[in-house]
């Protein structure tokens, strides 16, 4: 079961939604501590991801400074931290390594140019407000994505820890058990502090405990530990992407593909973190922040960045309350690189870093929400499970697309079968009630069928609705008149309008009629555009049920009404009484 997450008191939202109006000394302190942890965590990650991208290791550090600040200040999320990621790094290497030797000046130039182009595309996505497409990521997909990402983080962290313990070809009898002790101390301290002192920076406390144990262990036993390597004191240098038309044309398709990769990660991570924090995300603003961060980063030796799960979740768990945590993380990282604390930083054991990532992975798997999703419906469970497995087996951005695709397929299937309920007046108040909701046997009017339409009649649902209408005509040929309660029919497209037009014609040819009760304005406008409204005229559209029945009942076959004993409508009282013994 997941340990309790940090209790983070949210910043009081300002009336205009501006986060900095709620900044106080308490939030600054929380953000500073979270930023310190973020600065320490990004060093090994940045170096590793730069190597994945085929870039010199220091470029991974550069990419965690300027883009991180810009994305935090211009984005929407208060907790997402941007920087280099494994998916972006691998995608860059796969797409650009055929064009230039990785690590070479030409390769770096192509990477920076592609980063600029991706930033421009992201900016245009935000400018034209296309972020609404991200709303199609269902909660079950997010839960599956988070669970799969947690497994990946745990796998790589555990693998790193295993290599630390058994490095130098060691065996279980000659292993570096101090590395394992440091990892256990770090994760245990973090979990205990998170449970007993939820307002304390638990992850920073765990890192300090692991650091202290490593120092004491090495002093008394002489066993060596693997530490962070010292990094040269450098600032991100100014860089200039290649603006030549040939290069821009060469990278246009690659930049578009990289944009999909980056945006897929960014929105998934932003929504996943928001699911934990309860914040509402403005997707277009999030894309704006990502776009500006990559545009700015390309001029400061930073390669493609986006929201980083490995940095965002530790940032949230460490108690970050505003985007200033990400800003502090970059500033502190910069101070570490140029200041006197580099030697102290180089002494942090890598086993403690791996342990913190294991803790983060543990907190990401939300067992209660997984249970809730699985119990809710089979479709939600399939989306969750498929996204979880896809995250483990294929690139992370495509895993999200698979989950989204499945959720859309299930949604389309559900909406393609709108509910059509047959109604009869029932009870003392004579409410129109679905027959299936009435326990006692009831009968319909032999000539008029009442149906409540619940759902949209669009191209995907037209076949099903048409089949149901055909069923009514063939199964109940005497019910030549149809009154549709259309209040719950929210949308009709051209296929739906043609379906109702066909039903209107068939009913009229059979000597009956088609009537509608309270269709929505949106539906009526669609009928006007299709020409159906002129056919219906106001004689077939009614604002109240009593008006509809008052108009339809007198048009029924009087001979059949004279023999009918059901008399389910109040308007039937004006009909002559049926002969005794007649039905």
Image (cartoon, rainbow, N blue to C red):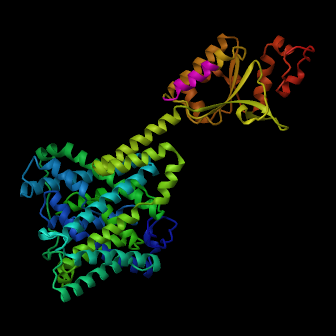
Q: Residue shown at 65%/17% (left/top)?
A: 473
* x and y, in percent, of residue 181 in the image: 27, 77
Depth order, front residue of 479/386: 386
* x and y, in percent, of residue 11 in the image: 48, 72
Q: Residue shown at 54%/26% (left/top)?
A: 464
Name the image quarter holding residue 60: bottom left
Depth order, front residue of 36/350: 350
Name the image quarter holding residue 292: bottom left
Give yes or no for residue 425 being in the magenta stretch: no
Give yes or no for residue 465 being in the magenta stretch: yes
Please state, as top left, top right, bottom left or bottom right, where the C terminus lies in the image. top right
Q: Residue shown at 14%/56% (left/top)?
A: 241
118 lies above or below 544: below
Q: Over which residues does the magenta segment extend?
A: 460-471
* x and y, in percent, of residue 427 in the image: 82, 37
* x and y, in percent, of residue 451 in the image: 68, 28
Is residue 307 in sight in this rendering? no
């Amino acid at each position: 079961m997941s340990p309790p997450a940090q209790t983070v008191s949210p910043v009081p939202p300002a009336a205009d939604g501006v986060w900095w109006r709620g900044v106080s000394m308490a939030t600054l302190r929380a953000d500073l501590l979270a930023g310190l942890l973020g600065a320490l965590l990004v060093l090994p990650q940045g170096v590793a991801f730069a190597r994945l991208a085929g870039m010199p290791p220091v470029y991974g550090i550069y990419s965690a400074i300027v883009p991180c600040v810009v994305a935090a200040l211009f984005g929407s999320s208060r907790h997402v931290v941007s920087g280099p990621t494994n998916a972006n790094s691998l995608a860059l290497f796969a797409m650009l390594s055929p064009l230039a030797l990785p690590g070479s000046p030409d390769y770096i130039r192509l990477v920076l140019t592609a980063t600029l182009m991706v930033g421009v595309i992201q900016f245009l996505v935000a400018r034209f407000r296309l972020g609404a497409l991200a709303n199609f990521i269902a909660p079950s997909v997010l839960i599956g994505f988070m669970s799969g990402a947690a497994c990946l983080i745990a796998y790589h962290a555990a693998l790193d820890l295993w290599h630390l313990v058994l490095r130098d070809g060691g065996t279980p009898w000659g292993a570096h058990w101090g590395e394992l002790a440091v990892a256990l101390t770090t994760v245990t301290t973090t979990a205990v502090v998170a449970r007993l002192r939820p307002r304390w920076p638990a992850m920073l406390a765990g890192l300090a405990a692991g650091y202290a144990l490593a120092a004491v262990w090495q002093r008394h036993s002489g066993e060596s530990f693997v530490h962070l390597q010292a990094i040269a004191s450098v600032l991100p240098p100014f860089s200039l992407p290649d603006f030549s038309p040939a290069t821009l044309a060469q990278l246009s398709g690659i930049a578009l593909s990289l944009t999909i990769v980056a945006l897929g990660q960014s929105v998934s991570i932003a929504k996943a973190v928001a699911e934990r924090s309860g914040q509402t995300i403005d997707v277009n603003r999030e894309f704006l922040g990502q776009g500006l961060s990559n545009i700015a980063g390309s001029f400061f030796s930073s390669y493609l960045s986006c929201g980083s799960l490995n940095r965002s979740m530790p940032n949230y768990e460490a108690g970050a309350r505003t985007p200033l945590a990400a800003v502090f993380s970059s500033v502190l990282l910069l101070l570490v690189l140029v200041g006197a604390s580099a030697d102290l930083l180089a002494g942090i054991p890598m086993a403690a870093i791996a342990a913190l990532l294991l803790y983060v992975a543990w907190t990401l798997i939300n067992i209660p929400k997984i249970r809730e999703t699985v119990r809710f419906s089979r479709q939600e469970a399939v989306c969750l499970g498929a996204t979880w497995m896809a995250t483990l087996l294929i690139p992370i951005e495509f895993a999200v697309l698979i989950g989204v695709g499945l959720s859309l397929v299930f949604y389309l299937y559900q909406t393609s079968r709108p509910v059509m309920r047959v109604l009869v007046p029932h009870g003392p108040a004579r409410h129109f009630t679905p027959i299936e909701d009435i326990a006692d046997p009831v009968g319909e009017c032999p000539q008029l069928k009442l149906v409540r339409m619940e759902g949209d009649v669009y191209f995907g649902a037209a076949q099903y609705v048409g089949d149901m209408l055909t069923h009514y005509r063939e199964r109940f040929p005497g019910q030549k008149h149809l009154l549709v309660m259309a209040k719950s029919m929210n949308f009709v497209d051209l296929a739906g309008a043609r379906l109702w037009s066909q039903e209107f014609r068939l009913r009229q040819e059979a000597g009956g009629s088609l009537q509608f009760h309270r269709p929505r304005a949106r539906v009526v406008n669609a009928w006007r555009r299709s020409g159906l409204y002129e056919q219906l005229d106001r004689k077939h559209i009614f604002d109240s049920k009593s008006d509809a029945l008052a108009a339809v009942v007198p048009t029924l076959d009087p001979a059949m009404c004279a023999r009918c004993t059901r008399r389910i409508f109040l308007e039937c009282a004006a009909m002559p009484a049926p002969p005794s013994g007649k039905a």
